[in-house]
Amino acid sequence: MELGNELRDALSSLVHGDSYRETLPRLKEIFSPELFARPSGLADEDRHRLTYQRLRHISDRLETGTPLLKQRDVLFPLLEWVALADPSLFYAFFLHHCTTVGTILEFGAGRDDLDDVLAQLASTETVGALLMTELGHGNSNAAVRTEAVYDPATREFVLTTPAPEAVKYPPSVACPELSRIGIVTAKLVVDGQDCGMFCFVVPLRDTVGPCPGVTIEPQDSAPILPLDWATVSFQGVRVPYRYWLRDSAQIAEDGTFTDALSNPAMRSRQASRLIRYVWEVAAVGLAAVTRASAAVAVRHAHARYTNGTFAGFADPMPVIRYRNQQRTLFGALSAAYVAAMAAKSLSGPEPVGRSAGEIRTLFTLKAAIDRLAERVTADARAASGVLGFSPSNRFLDYQGLAHAFNAAGLSTQVLHLNAAWTMALGFDYEPPADERAPAQGQDLRDPARWRALTSTRERRLHERLVAELGAARAAGLGEFDVWNDRFDLAEQLAEAHALRLLVDLVRTETEALSHADARRLVRDLCALHLLGEISAHSGWYLAEGVLTADEVGSLPGLLDQICADLAPHAMELADALDVPYDLVGAPIAHADYATAFTKAPFADPT
């Protein structure tokens, strides 16, 4: 039975809001499949040039009078299509339009003496980069060694890299013949005093080469995300006073430093305000490649035939008939819809003054979407056989993007530990209420049951973590030792919290659907992922008396039954994910994939 248009529209509404439809013509105009065909056979330097040519192409077709960060209804659809077309470009795009411009808007608010810099960035005449992390400190920005020493005689800052471990790594600024500006984090020193970490606008190179005092050493390009990686160091680079992104701080003519924040540690933590751009951007881009990977793999499984041992060497049949393939691929579809709903919840208008709880939800969902992206891109690739390893089918590109963003904006593990830390301290957090769970034996397909199960796990893990932390402190342990033996428990709590957030999102989105068939279909589809996560902890649920042994034993059969119910709708569920197949360009998304693999250009399979 085919899905009607009304049902298809209802499913697509879970992926995108109404404004996306208004943006589609513009996206199709910008992202012609010919201009954005997947690069093949290019040397690294040519590949990097192409990335920045594409960045300029997009900027030339946008209204540049207003920064994209202030046009979120345009920015987020653009980010989706950039991620699908070219993951390397996605990385460069977000560094330029979000982190570089975002830093200037954030810490240079209310000033007009940076308008010329913003104009250069808007036109992509100069490309921006973020230089925060340092070689000797990994992802930690708490111990920045780069120094910006104030010179009262000239009202300039002298930027210096004092030691090899303070070298900035890994900014993508090695591409020659390109003008670059960096946002550099450095410890501000005024009259010998450490004033905390600030951001500075620093010209890095022009079309001829690096600026005086700036050393740029190209590094190997990562095969999974080809970019012009480099190490960057500074020796006596003079930075004008106006390029100091001083936020609320200032230095008077007599050299007196003042700051509304009371100490250097508080000031240094302010740079973390920028990370929200990484979280939002990552959520949108990773959800997009998750959708594309799932949709392409499901389409291919309907066209890929086998007549092996388990088919009794009978007539060939599509691999999608095999239950193990269904569990993998329908599970990927399920995760793709969940990721899409989570990303959509983050891509509306930016809240004014996010609370601590809203910030935790933002980075928790970023971490959850990244894990979904890593899992789905890997599963879709593996389920597609040898063709899954063909670069032209995009799984490896998309998997590389997911791996890269696991570490960007703090690693997933660190985000989980930060979430657990804030929840244990009660920062804008109340554990889920001790609601009466639906009676045992109630249908495990019921979203109310998912809510009861995931809430119970989150609440009990929170109670256990708080109790163990309290006992350890009472025993006189230092704070490091208090946490060191409880990191595993803390991660379990954060993961449980993330799953409960996803359950709540799915319930809210599906209950809002007016189409009854769509509600039922989405409920069953999302059940594959959410019940799969619950099943992964079935031993805990059984030990806690929340699930019975019979219910735990029934889960594999229930998941198989859900797959059987979804099988007639799988292709249409895939296409309702709104993937622009012609832009993705994966030959195996085509019904006649062998012909598509050997001929260009790729035809739209729809």
Image (cartoon, rainbow, N blue to C red):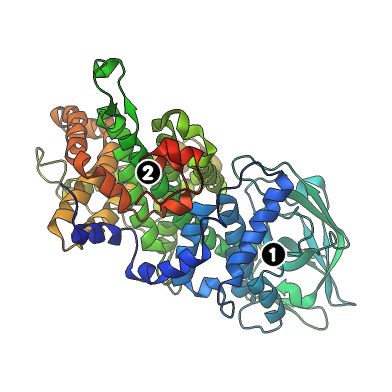
Q: Nearer the viewer, residue 146 or 506?
A: 506
Q: Is residue 333 visible?
A: yes
Q: Residues within 10 Å of mark 1 (few under 14, many from 20)?
A: many
Q: Are marks 2 and 1 in contact (CB under 8 Å)?
A: no
Residue drawn at the location 27% of the way across and 16% of the way down? 313
Above or below, comparing residue 24 to residue 463 in the picture: below
Between tags 2 and 1, which lies in front?
2
| Residue position marked by numbered label 1 in the rendering | 127
Q: Nearer the viewer, residue 4 or 86?
A: 4
- Give the x, y percent position of residue 26: 46, 70
- Kindly identify the amino acid type of the residue bearing the numbered disc 2: Ala
- Give the x, y percent position of residue 382: 42, 31
Q: Residues within 10 Å of mark 2 (few under 14, many from 20)?
A: many
Above or below, comparing residue 200 to residue 45 in the picture: below
Is residue 8 found left or right of 104 in the rendered image? left
Q: Which mark is residue 294?
A: 2
Q: Is residue 536 visible?
A: no
Residue drawn at the location 45% of the way across and 64% of the way down? 77
